[in-house]
Image (cartoon, grey):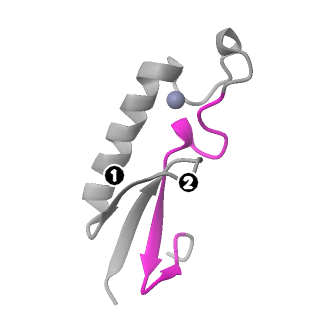
């Protein structure tokens, strides 16, 4: 099976599904840039100016790339 690269945020919103990791990274980067317009942080630090709002807990701006092989998550099985 071909690999799929799925770009998610931490709310479970799917930004895109790609066959090539470079394309997935482009989508992820665009999603991070969109987030920056709202969160106004570098995604790595808490922003006290926005109360308890945090856009990303697990990854910068909450954007991550999941690698799927034939329906199975293989993200950490490189
Ligand atoms: Zn952000």
- Residue 7: assigned label: none
Label 1, label 2: how many angstroms apart (C-alpha)?
17 Å
Q: Is residue 48 above or below residue 26?
A: above
Q: Is label 2 in a helix, a strand or a loop?
A: loop
Q: Quadrant of the N terminus?
A: bottom left
Q: Nearer the viewer, residue 14 or 47?
A: 14
Percent x, y for residue 19?
27, 70
Q: Is residue 64 magenta?
A: yes
Residue at image x 32%, y 38%? 30
Q: Is residue 48 left or right of residue 15?
A: right
**Is 69 left or right of 18, judged from the image as shown?**
right
Q: What is the quadrant of residue 35 in the picture? A: top left
Looking at the rendering, the stretch of residues picked out in magenta corresponds to 54-75
Residue under label 1: 25
Work out whether 45 lies above or below 26: above
- Label 1–label 2 contact, CB within 8 A: no
Residue at position x 66%, y 9% in the image = 49
Disc 2 crowd rating (10 Å Cα; few below 14, some 14-19, many 20+) is few
Numbered label attached to residue 12: 2
The image shows residue 22, relative to residue 38, as above or below, that is below
The residue located at (65%, 17%) in the rendering is: 47
Which residue is at the front of the view, 38 or 29? Answer: 38
Horizontal and vertical percent position of residue 50: 65, 14
* Mark toward the start of the polypeptide (1 vs 2): 2
Look at the image and say whether residue 48 sits in the magenta stretch: no
Q: Which residue appears at 52% of the width and 70% of the height?
A: 75
């Amino acid at each position: 099976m071909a690999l799929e690269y799925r770009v998610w945020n931490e709310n479970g919103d799917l930004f895109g599904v790609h066959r090539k990791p470079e394309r997935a990274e482009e989508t992820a980067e665009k999603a991070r840039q969109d987030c920056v317009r709202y969160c106004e942080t570098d995604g790595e630090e808490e922003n006290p100016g926005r109360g308890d709002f945090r856009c990303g807990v697990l990854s910068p701006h909450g954007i991550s790339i999941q690698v799927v092989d034939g329906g199975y998550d293989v993200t950490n099985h490189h």
